[in-house]
Image: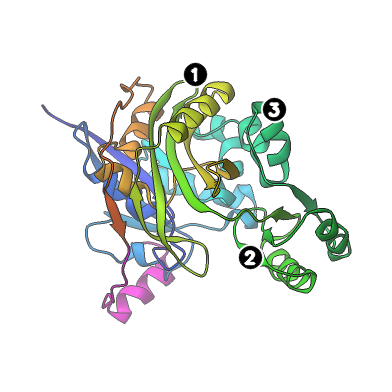
Amino acid sequence: MKREKLTIAVSGLNNTDNPGPGVPVIRGLRESTHFEPRILGLAYENMEPGAYMEGVADKTYLIPYPSNGMEPLLARLEEIHRRDKIDVLIPNFDSELLPLIKAENRLTAMGIRTFLPTIGQYDERLKSNLPEFGKKYDLSVPGSHTVSSALEIPGICRELSGPWMIKGKFYDAVLAHNVEQAIAAFYRISAQWGLPVVVQQYISGTEVNVVAVGDGKGNTIGAVPMRKMFVTDKGKAWSGITIADKYLLDLTKRIISNTFWRGGMELEMIRSSDNKYYLVEINPRIPAWVYLAVAAGQNLPEAIVHLAMGMNPEPFTAFEAGKMFIRYSYDMIVDVNTHQSFAFNGEK
């Protein structure tokens, strides 16, 4: 069967100890049996490893940070699109999602397709809104409060028994065992990611996550749960294993059905010692470990492209439990002229 040729732009090429999802998303797209992808990598920094890795992007462009404003980002995407027609855009960072969700009509008018959550879906699952989300959909959620001043923290720590996770609005989480540590974490995280900051009660147990895709109509196109086996000091899974957990799968399908979730998502859960599941976070995009789902039999990046193209992919019905991923470090050798050219010209 002849595969359709598609140009797909993918961000999140920072394949470091705090990896972005871009490289594993691209690996999944390369294995598509339905289309032949030409991959445009979108990098925010000229040192993002994915820009230099062989066999990842066919061409890479530097783009401005969303924090610089929506217009510079959209103008750069429009410039790239004029030169290198983009069929589908897959953004992979939380911080870029909201601007691109708001710009969906403008992107569509350019001819760039996306498949992203709605603004309502994005806002509803924010860390600051998670307690209300849990009440609305009958989910167990750790106690938490949103804070904008360090002066609020001692009172919250008295209300919620410790320890506590101090979380940034987009990224980062620090475990604090006392008020002083919580305040120090507040200042560090707010300086990097801005306000508000979330103080969430720490739940001891096993970390289990689910990567899933919803079609926007209440249907789950695919879902794969995994248990973290090794976690870095940044809280990122460095190895994990797919698990056959019916409760997790049923819970995921219920959330997608109730919210009519559109696009990729990651549920971060804690399974306590008494086998109770707590929802601690919902990420509104596919995570950096998504290639584990591909290897287990569900090519979720491919499904997102199908949905963006207006197709109705058949839902995945199974995956292979017991598949593991293990990350590793690898030193690439890059000519300095290649790096300098990329930094100066904004493309390679």
Labelled disc at residue 174: 2
Q: Is residue 264 above or below residue 41?
A: above
Q: Secondary structure beneath disc 1? A: loop
**What separation in Å lies between label 3 and label 2 (alpha carbons)?**
27 Å
Camera-side mark, 1 or 2: 2
Q: Is residue 201 magenta?
A: no
Determine whether, in the image, residue 129 is placed left or right of residue 90: right
Residue labelled with disc 3: 136
Q: Secondary structure beneath disc 2? A: strand
Q: Which contiguous range is marked in magenta?
A: 327-348
**What separation in Å lies between label 1 and label 2 (alpha carbons)?**
36 Å
Crowdedness near tag 1: few (<14), some (14–19) or many (≥20) residues, C-alpha within 10 Å: few
Q: Is residue 347 above or below residue 218?
A: below
* Between 21 and 164, the one nearer to me in the picture: 164
Residue labelled with disc 1: 217
Q: Which sits earlier in the primary sequence, circle 1 or circle 2?
A: 2
Q: Which sits earlier in the primary sequence, circle 3 or circle 2?
A: 3
